[in-house]
Image (cartoon, rainbow, N blue to C red):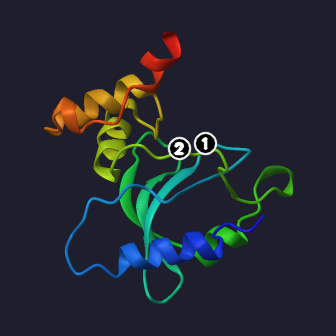
């Protein structure tokens, strides 16, 4: 599987090239299909290898940091499977919200309730939050 498509690469590079510090929405989610490791990535440096985002190796301490695309591409886990891209990931919040929720949960989460609590804790007004998809599903 191609971890970063040309379209994703262009978006990551554009985010990485911004001069001001910006709380970007994640562009791509990568994961280990045979383990707990997950990465929500927002930026790519001009070197074409250094990615920035929320990194969770599954030890209960997710953190913001950098990771090498070449290293991720070279990983062969259990059963010989490599890192994969989550084709169904639809980011709805800026990276800071995912980081706050991950800090509370001890792992990267997409749980709507935890993400909304994190957004509120960071001071995002309800009017700025994306619509609650769980609420729409219940109707």
Q: Quadrant of residue 74?
A: bottom right
Asked if residue 131 lies left or right of residue 81, the reply is: left
With respect to residue 88, does 111 lie above or below? above
Front residue of 55/5: it is 5
With respect to residue 43, does 62 lie above or below? above
The residue furthest top is: 139
Instruction: Name the residue: 52% across, 77% down.
Output: 10
Asked if residue 118 lies left or right of residue 67, the reply is: left
Instruction: Name the residue: 67% across, 50% down.
Output: 87
Asked if residue 28 lies left or right of residue 126, the reply is: right
Sequence-first disc among 1 and 2: 1
Crowd tier of the residue under label 2, counting other residues whose Cα lies within 10 Å: few below 14, some 14–19, many 20 or above: some
Residue denoted by label 2: 58
Q: Quadrant of residue 72?
A: bottom right
Crowd tier of the residue under label 1, counting other residues whose Cα lies within 10 Å: few below 14, some 14–19, many 20 or above: some
With respect to residue 109, does 22 lie above or below? below
Residue 137: image location, x then y, percent: 52, 17
Front residue of 65/30: it is 30
Q: Quadrant of residue 28?
A: bottom right
Residue denoted by label 1: 36
Query: Pointer 1 and pointer 2: residues touching (CB < 8 Å)?
Result: yes
Asked if residue 14 lies left or right of residue 18, the reply is: right
Identify the secondary structure beneath mark 2: loop
- Quadrant where the N terminus sits is bottom right
Residue 3: image location, x then y, percent: 67, 66
Instruction: Name the residue: 53% across, 43% down.
Output: 58
With respect to residue 130, does 90 lie above or below? below
The residue furthest bottom is: 47
């Amino acid at each position: 599987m191609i971890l970063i498509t040309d379209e994703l690469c262009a978006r990551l590079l554009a985010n990485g090239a911004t001069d001001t510090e910006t709380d970007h929405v994640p562009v791509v989610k990568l994961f280990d299909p045979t383990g707990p490791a997950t990465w929500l990535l927002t930026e790519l440096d001009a070197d074409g290898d250094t990615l920035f985002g929320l990194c969770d190796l599954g030890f209960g301490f997710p953190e913001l940091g950098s990771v090498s695309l070449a290293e991720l591409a070279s990983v062969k886990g259990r059963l010989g499977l490599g890192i994969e891209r989550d084709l169904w990931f639809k980011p709805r919040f800026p990276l800071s919200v995912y980081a706050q929720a991950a800090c509370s949960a001890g792992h990267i989460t997409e749980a709507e309730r935890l993400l909304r609590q994190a957004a509120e804790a960071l001071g995002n007004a309800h009017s700025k939050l994306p619509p609650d998809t769980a609420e729409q599903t219940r109707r």
